[in-house]
Amino acid sequence: MDTNLLKQILPVEGQVLENFGETDWSLFGRQAHAVVFPHSEEEVTSILSVANENNWNCMPAGNGTWLEGCLNTDRDVNLVLSISKMNNILVHEPDNLFVELEAGVTLEQLQATLRSSKQWLPLDPPGANSSTMGAIVATSSCGALQTGFGKPRDHVLGATLITGDGKTLELGGKTVKNVAGFDLLKLLSGSWGRFGVITKLVMRLHPLPEADRTLLFSSNQQHPGPRLAHDIMHTPAMLQSISILSPGLGEEPESKDTRVAVRILESEAAVDQVEALILEQVKISPLKKMNGLESKKFFERLHNVDENSDVVIRVTSLPSEVGILIDQLENLQHLVAEKDGFGIKFLAHSESGVLIVLIDNLKRDENWLIQSTKALLKLRTSVENYGGSLTLLHAPEDLIRAVKPWGSLSEVETLFSGLEKVFDPTGILSQRELPKRKTEGRQCL
């Protein structure tokens, strides 16, 4: 691979990175030939054009913190294209509740800018401190706040996409009602960069809530976690998140009880009213009440519960099936090394039907791969029988190849193969398998 061609396009020192540490920009221990950092859409277009001419396999990225996510390919990556240097907030119109920004802007940077106008973007993906907005949208990453505010696709009003063959597409606009016909904008959320590189985004904003309160409940035989969460869901009020935490997660990691955390983001007056309605609904008192910064930090810690896990699984289902699927996690306990006192851990966003399953210490004996593959495929079949889906977000490479990130693409494979031929005719962006689109709207962390 001749990186001199790239240096002609990217003349500024540091824009073409060829020599980096063993763990930097790596994919299961393998590294791309180069990482490039364009400063403009014109440079992105030129990079993709050169990649097409030379048949270089190219992976779009943000800050490179999740390059291995859902990766399942035998192809080497010639080039990682990071948009992290395209990080300017271009337009912010507080009165119209929207912001236009380059895709390399991090969520943390954006929230800090919006705070002075008492506005925010209600997204809480894993790794929020370093996640770029382009990567958040491309991977459809979100957390507990999806219950009250939706997924990334629900916040995107417009986007600029540079397709695999170097064409520039302007999608959407700056108002909610800006789409007629087939909505290409919705394809970007969860596309994992398969259709092109996102360079700009227009995001819909929300007023910053006056008060932030979390009620933490402890479950017991009379009030098991899933049933308690189900009862809270039926409170006659808008709740921003309802999360079920297994033992080993959250504020008190030594706790042996499953807990339920309810977050209320409202005006000062409304928070007390909503809390009273919840307590009237469930007839038990919370184990702990957190307000303001304490409440915010509690959920920030939950964003990164999977940071050191060997295996991370996302299950999506109907909210009514979450309890049944939690019970089935017992079938995975034999995959955990004995030194792990908690075994399988989980975090469920019950009203969204999302269940995150964590194996912190995967057993690595002689038959680990066969046993792990069999157990995960069995769980995937069970989940699909309930109308849900199982995504393997992170795991050792051998296990990802055996289980596959999303399983079979089934009847939508032909559709997406056709779309890829339109957006990326030479296939230079094809590193990852695509998820089943029937559940894309729910595939969030």
Image (cartoon, rainbow, N blue to C red):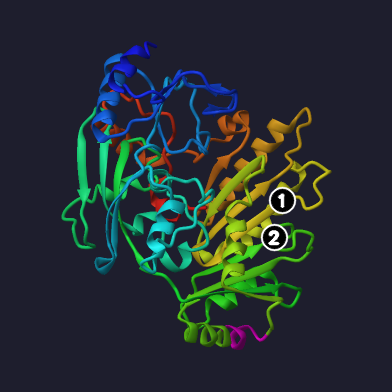
Is 336 on the left or on the right of 347, as rendered? right
> Is residue 323 visible to us here?
no
Q: CA distance from mark 2 to mark 1?
A: 9 Å
Q: Position of residue 64 (x, y in %)?
A: 49, 35
Residue under the image location 20 percent in, 44 percent down: 170
Type of residue at label 1?
Ile
Mark yes or no: residue 74 visible.
yes
Q: Is residue 215 magenta?
A: no
Q: Residues within 10 Å of mark 2 (few under 14, many from 20)?
A: many
In the rendered structure, find residue 344 and report the number of the disc placed on it. 1
Q: In the rendered image, which quarter is residue 324 located in?
A: bottom right
Image quarter in which the N terminus is found = top left
Give left or right: position of 177 versus 201: left
400 sits left or right of 435 in the view: right
Residue denoted by label 2:
246
The residue lying toward the viewer, choosing from 26 and 117, is 117
Nearer to me, 203 or 182: 203
Secondary element type, mark 2: loop
Pointer 2 with pointer 1, Cβ within 8 A: yes
| Magenta-drawn stretch, dominant element (helix, strand or loop) | helix
Q: Amino acid at mark 2?
A: Ser
Position of 379 with respect to 69 (left or right) is right
Q: Which corner quadrant of the image does residue 232 belong to?
A: bottom right
Position of residue 374 measured from the top left corner of the image (x, y, whole percent): 66, 38
Numbered circle sitting on residue 353? none
| Residue 49 screen position, x and y as percent | 25, 23
Q: Which residues are magenta?
A: 278-283
Residue name at image x 59 percent, y 31 percent: 402
Under circle 1, the secondary element is loop
Q: Is residue 260 above or below residue 165?
A: below
Whichever of labels 2 and 1 marks the residue nearer the N terminus, that label is: 2
